[in-house]
Image: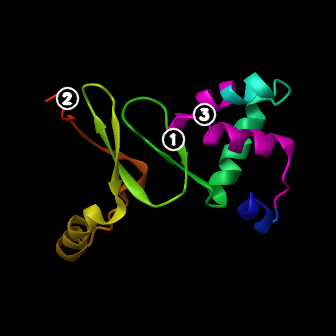
Amino acid sequence: MARVRGAGGRLTASRRAVVEALLAGNHHVTADEIVARVAERHPEVHRSTVYRTLERLEEVGVITHVHLGHGPSTFHLVTRPHHHAVCSGCGAVVEVPFGALDSLADQLREEHGFELSPQHFALSGRCRNCR
């Protein structure tokens, strides 16, 4: 909430409700899951307010979104930068250390002039239990 305030934003009850919903339970949640969590405790908060709040929280660097497969984007708090790996069998999500793709990024930059930006998508594969 300090980042929101620092960026000139107000600390409204709606924004607090969205942050509470992000902190509750699963670290990677869809916008619809956040809407449902907010509605449980704050039914007066409209769906569009939740979506606008998510956009604002992402703009100021409090949350980020990632595409974990074919479903909707998921959001999570920006606690430490990381990438994601998703099991194509069971859907399990593994947080991958941020520097794990550095050598690939360096190689793509040097050989092809391509700047890798893997923060918004997940690596796909199969987990230990689904292999």
Q: Say which residue label 3 marks.
A: 31
Q: Give the range drawn in magenta.
A: 9-36
What's the distance in space between the residues labelled 1 and 3, CA to CA? 12 Å
Query: Taken as a whole, is the magenta stretch helix, strand or loop?
Result: helix
Q: Does 28 appear above or below 119?
A: above
Q: Say which residue label 1 marks.
A: 27
Query: Disc 2 or disc 3, which is closer to the eye?
Result: 2
Residue at the image point whose x is 40% and y is 57% from the top? 82
Residue at the image point whose x is 38% and y is 30% from the top? 70
What's the distance in space between the residues labelled 2 and 1, CA to CA? 21 Å
Which one is in front, 50 or 114?
Answer: 50
**Which numbered disc, 2 or 3, marks the residue that appears first in the sequence?**
3
Which one is in front, 96 or 108?
Answer: 96
Residue kind at label 2, given as amino acid type: Asn
Residue kind at label 3, given as amino acid type: Ala
Q: Say which residue label 2 marks.
A: 129
Relative horizontal placement of residue 75, taking residue 106 as reference (left or right): right
